[in-house]
Image: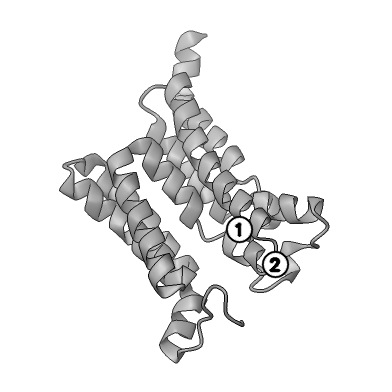
Amino acid sequence: MHTELLSMAPALAFAIGYLLGSVPFGILLTRAAGAGDLRQIGSGNIGATNVLRTGRKGLAAATLILDLLKGAAAVLIVSALFPGQAIIAAIGAFIGHCYPVWLRFRGGKGVATLMGVVVALHWPSGLVYAAVWLGLLAGLRISAVAGMAAAISAPLAAALFGHFDLVLPFLGFAVIVVYKHAENIERLLAGTEPRIGGRR
């Protein structure tokens, strides 16, 4: 039985990661607070930036923290249960957030969840990710630019720290984050991308 469980470890690791990653905290929190359906507000995205458009800063902060924690939790839980399967759990959590089956695969853009994943897999790269994300967010106040730059910084940081085993998965995550920001990129090129705290 133990051997059978070990043979199923990759599938179980992905499933645990996916289930944790696909919890839509933004939707759950805004509904619980009586702020309506987040998918009908602002950009329709389920992440913290769109929660902020409800005017509830506390809810936005809670969404950010919980989306980050679910990514980290998936990696840490699977690492304890199935050593060596952390990357699989990370992939599951990230995909679960971006493409949750219960929301018809229309999830978030993955920036906060990816930070949790990166921190749990290699905290120095996570520090670089956080510094880039928060630094650009504070300086430019454009969530899309900060998020994409942070995601791109992850594989670069992993390479600089010599963790080449993480470069490819981090690069894959970054590509998906940029892809999920396609509409933001169009608005950036047109000069119409809103800034945090400004009018949409």
**Place of residue 12 in the rendered image (x, y in percent of width and height, measured from the top left):** 52, 29
Label located before the other in sequence (2 or 1): 2
Q: Quadrant of the C terminus?
A: bottom right
Marking on residue 55: 2
Residue 77 relative to residue 25: left or right: left
User: Residue at left 70%, top 61%?
Assistant: 56
Residue 45 in view:
no
Residue extending farthest bottom:
190
Tell me the SS state at disc 2. Answer: loop
Residue extending farthest right:
34
Residue 41 in view:
yes
Q: Is residue 151 above or below residue 195?
A: above
Q: Amino acid at mark 2?
A: Gly
Disc 1 marks which residue? 107
Tell me the SS state at disc 1. Answer: loop
User: Residue at left 36%, top 62%?
Assistant: 135
Say which quarter of the image contains residue 83: top left
User: Residue at left 55%, top 55%?
Assistant: 98
**Place of residue 59 in the rendered image (x, y in percent of width and height, measured from the top left):** 67, 54
Q: Quote the CA–CA distance across marks 2 and 1.
A: 21 Å
